[in-house]
Image: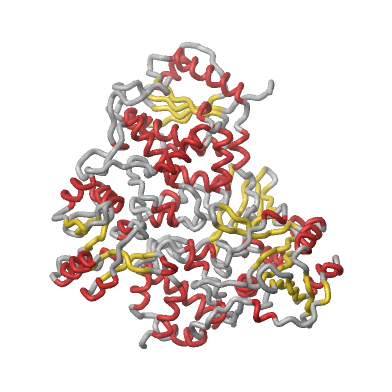
Amino acid sequence: MADFEPRIVAFVCNWCTYAGADLTGTSRIKYASNVRIVRFPCTGRIDYMLLLKAFDEGADGIIVSGCHPNDCHYTSGNFHARRRWIMFRSLCDFLGIDIRRIKFSWVSAAEGAKWADIVNSTVSSIRELGPYEEYRKIVKRPAKEVTNG
Amino acid sequence: MNIEKRLVRKGSLEKLFNLLKNNGNTIMGPLERNGKTRFASVNSFRDIASGYVQTTQSSKEVAFPRAEKILDYSKNAAGMSVKGIDPAEIPQVVLWGVRPCDAMGIGELSAIFNWDYKDKIYNNRLSRVTVIGFSCEKADEYCFCTSVGGNPGSTEGSDILLTRMGGDGDFLAEIITGKGARIAALSPELFEEAGNPEKDKFLASVPVRFEREMISRKLDKIFESDEWVSQSLKCLGCGACAYVCPTCACFDIQDEAHGRSGSRVRCWDSCGFSMFTLHTSGHNPREVQSQRWRQRIMHKFSYMPDRLSVYGCTGCGRCSRACPADMNILEHLISIQEAEV
Amino acid sequence: MDELRKKAGELLEASAVKVIIGYENGSDGKTRALFAEKPEETARLVFDSRCVMNLATYVTKKEVRNKGRIGLVATLPVMRAVIQLASEHQVDDAGLLVIGITPESKMVEFKDLAEVEAFVHRYQIEIDSKQKEMLDKLEKMTPSERWDFWIRELTPCFKCYACRAACPMCYCHRCTVDFNQPQWVPVPSHELGNIEWHIMRAIHLAGRCVDCDACYNACPLAIPLNLLTKRMLLDAKEHLGGYQPSIKADHLMSTYKPDDKDNFII
């Protein structure tokens, strides 16, 4: 497992976390390079299907991050998102999807250091969990024929 | 060839099963889960379901899987590369425990897959299948094989047909084809002298309920009838009937792409879905469920006999059993036969 | 039952409704939907414990709606579904009259949907004890064991979408699963396609499911897919204060509280 480099996809909102991650860079804070950031207008726009797609495409871990409560650029997008996360997370857990691999966070535009911490801690915890083989097994690539077995 | 009659002791079935298994065959047999039976790869003789009138799912997946890769492709600097299916990868399969109506369905399905284009993958799969049928000792109110050219002891489509002779008795084995004879030749001692037992008395009785030729003729005249609307009002528009049907052959082609490579997959589809005939323009020639229901019946009892000289229904009754809204095909066919024109 | 037939007949006679949707005897001792348009057809109406199909699924169907105002024979789960549909602006008093059947199998008349709502609110949505046992059993498993359980249970699924068709809440003309630009859910019924479909279905029913088990009853393969929506129901109760279908109240998933649970957010 020593040479396993986790692949992390981060879904972040434009107004807080993306700006926060930008600040991490401009502040010259170094952090793990395992994360691919996908920018959204708001956490309210992050469809749960996108999270599943990330696993389909080989992600080992996922970060979903947006504005702190009451800081949403659109007033309540993050509040709505939070409700969805509560339900989605629990459904995933019920299905046996490893929810330790999905991290949710609030990172403001001023929290460059927090972003670096979250990425680093996520990478190290996913490194410990190893590649997400369980999910990858069902992503038949290329799709094998199904003969009703 | 002439049908050869043999006796297989009830205790010999397991030996036959193990023999076939050890000969490198994948055995697809009925397995039960949650009270429903479906054909899947069987490892042990003891796992095989028994006591069912009919399996919930048909055995068509042996030649027409619900999702089947038909090619792989990839794109690189040198251009495109496409790789088809290697027939050598298709397993030798023994289909075990098939009812005569399902065995008959294989012929009807093959007619569709060999209509104008001869479907290579389908034919390749089928050529590797040996069918061991089991006659029906019992039937239920959904069964109507005798109305569509079958019967509970029909040998059509089977390579070997086994008929249990009374309650817990031994089996009469009818060796119907060369494939069947090859199986019998694997272990001749399991196939004993049978004499000439009267097979019919061990079979379920399934009364004839309608005349299919009459339905065909009637269908020519009732395309615009309100009958379709009243029959299909309770239809929910799912695909359960098509997916359990031994002769429904509609499929959809999907590309499962991942970056620069992917696979093309053939997946089951159903004329019952509203999206099935939806055009890119937004126009849908079968806009309401009654038109889709009509298509299902027309296809099986009018278009197929017209074009392929076979009917598309084996009377297995699965669609009626599986229907969540209790659309009973037998009832509807009888009412078509009786419809005023 | 006579009372129900009489009432249904009167409604058709008076043209208060154009069609009565109720239950009639079907195949093999089952019951099925009856669409009675003439008073004499109401003689075929039956009601007993076999009548479990959620008839509310028909009230959003175009061909049925085209007939005119519907009189719907509705048990408690059906009434709940009707109220949820009303709250989602899918049915209203002009198009629908509910003829209620109480949990004690008594007929009850309603003037309008507001009265139906009041009746529905007298009962809490309770998960049946056997199902609860199954949920608890799954809860006690490790995530890997649960994953194996679901992969095994969902493998037979051939995506006939009977669960979707039978669900009164699944009335979308075009379901997410039917979209192909982008293709959210793989079309083939392989493990991935199946599990993503069932996740999607359950999530879309979060805060809306009325726990009628229509999906499970419709499944030709008896996949226990209703456990997923039941789990969501329990979560809604545990984390978000639960819900009752209500014509005017905010939907559970389209509203929020500033103090919703967020102990899982870093």
**Left/right of residue B270 with respect to residue C76 in the rendered view:** right
The correct choice, above or below, for B90 with respect to A100 in the image is below
- Answer above or below: position of C174 versus B94: above
Say left or right for B234 vs B71. left
Q: Quadrant of residue C44?
A: bottom left
What percent of the width, then of the height, locates residue C24? 33, 68
Task: Tell me if residue B251 comes above or below residue B205 in the rendering.
Answer: above
Name the image quarter holding residue B49: bottom right
Q: Quadrant of the C terminus of chain B?
A: bottom left
Q: Position of residue B30 (x, y in %)?
A: 64, 59
Residue B308: image location, x then y, percent: 59, 80
The image position of residue B135, as x and y in percent, is 65, 73
Report the front residue among A23 and C213: C213
Quick check: can you spot residue B69? Answer: no
Report the label total.
0
> For this view, does C64 lie left or right of residue B301?
left
Residue drawn at the location 43% of the way across and 39% of the way down: C132
At 60% across and 42% down in the image, what residue appears? A138
* Residue beneath the point at 54% across and 67% down: B245
Q: Quadrant of the N terminus of chain B?
A: bottom right
Q: In percent of the image, x 78 and y 70: which residue is there?
A: B8
Query: Who is closer to the viewer here, C142 or B123?
Result: C142
Q: How was the colour assigned to the protein in this rendering?
A: secondary structure
Give the quadrant of residue B124.
bottom right
The answer to whether one can see residue C81 in this image is yes
